[in-house]
Amino acid sequence: MVNEISVGNISVSCFQSIEDVIKHVILNNDKVKPGVAIAINPEKIILSKNNDEMKEVITKATLRYPDGMGVSYVMSKKLGKKVARIPGCELWEQLLLASGKYNVPVFIVGASEAVVLLTYQKLIEQGVNVVGYQNGYFDSSTREKVIHRIKESGAKIVSVALGSPKQEYFMFECRKIVPDAFFMGVGGTYDVFTGNVKRAPSLFIKCKCEWLYRLLSQPTRVGRQLNLLKYIMLYLRGKL
């Protein structure tokens, strides 16, 4: 039984490691547990407070894991023991490598054509059974065709990199047609995986300051980082 801790009225699952998530919640040998995984960070907590539709989407997920350090910190304080942060990009990569051992069929969606193709090729080289891919540049008129391609592929794991909340909406729509698959929203993971975007240096990761590196690298993210300040204020006021 996985413990859950409420953070800003969102229940988030507690884990001790990435391996713990994969083995107990997603992939047990060659058996995939169907569902939808959503990474929870301070930005999503704040968005869920201001957007009822977003909150509904998040609460419908079968797996909500603490991707943001701010979330795992609050959970650790509430639980009275350490709750591991589960970086989405690392969870995704380890899950797909584990799936390759059992030849589990995987479908990847999102990013540009060049990036998703490179992601596909790199995963194939690592022994992952990728049965199809689709770039993220499709609209509502072609979305149904994409979903049926996923169904026809026989995929049991589907990773979606469309950015939030677009990827969450897509996953739940796709799940109606493909109920036996596990869906995971992965944001900009393909860009990092292929080296198109550099992840924060180890020093930033060790100091739990990846958010600062992203801000310094992309100053246009400053608006999004305001949500982190709102999150901190809610924590200090005891409202998380």
Image (tube, rainbow, N blue to C red):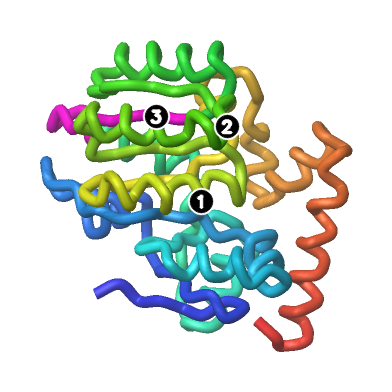
Query: What residue span does the magenta drawing correspond to?
Result: 98-109
Residue at the location (28% across, 22% down)?
A: 130
- Amino acid identity at mark 1: Glu
Q: Residues within 10 Å of mark 3 (few under 14, many from 20)?
A: few
Question: Could you give the CA–CA distance between mark 3 and mark 2, rounded to whole angstroms?
Answer: 10 Å
Residue 139's mark? 2
Q: How far is disc 1 from disc 2 in space, using C-alphas?
A: 15 Å
Q: Quadrant of residue 137?
A: top right
Q: Mark 1, mark 2: which one is toward the viewer?
A: 2
Q: Is residue 233 left or right of residue 102?
A: right
Residue situated furthest bottom in the rendering: 238
Secondary structure beneath dot 3 equals helix
Q: Compare marks 3 and 1 and give the one earlier in the sequence.
A: 3
Crowding around mark 1 (Cα neighbors within 10 Å: few <14, some 14 to 19, many 20+) is many
Q: Secondary structure at mark 1?
A: helix
- Quarter residue 132 falls in: top left
Give the residue drawn at x 47%, y 78%.
5
**Badge 3 is on which residue?**
145
Which label sits on residue 168? 1
Q: What amino acid is found at the position of numbered circle 3 in the picture?
A: Lys
Q: Was residue 100 drawn as part of the magenta stretch in this picture?
A: yes
| Residue 222 coordinates in the image, percent (x, y) | 87, 47
Q: Amino acid type of disc 2?
A: Asp
14 with respect to 125 (left or right)? right
Please determine whether, in this image, residue 45 is positioned above or below residue 147: below
Q: Is residue 125 above or below residue 160?
A: above
| Number of the label disc, if any, that sits on residue 1 | none
Of the two numbered discs 1 and 2 on the same chain, state the one appearing first in sequence.
2
What secondary structure is found at the residue carrying circle 2? loop
Q: Is residue 176 above or below residue 229?
A: above
Q: Residues within 10 Å of mark 2 (few under 14, many from 20)?
A: few
Spatial CA distance of label 3 from label 1 is 18 Å
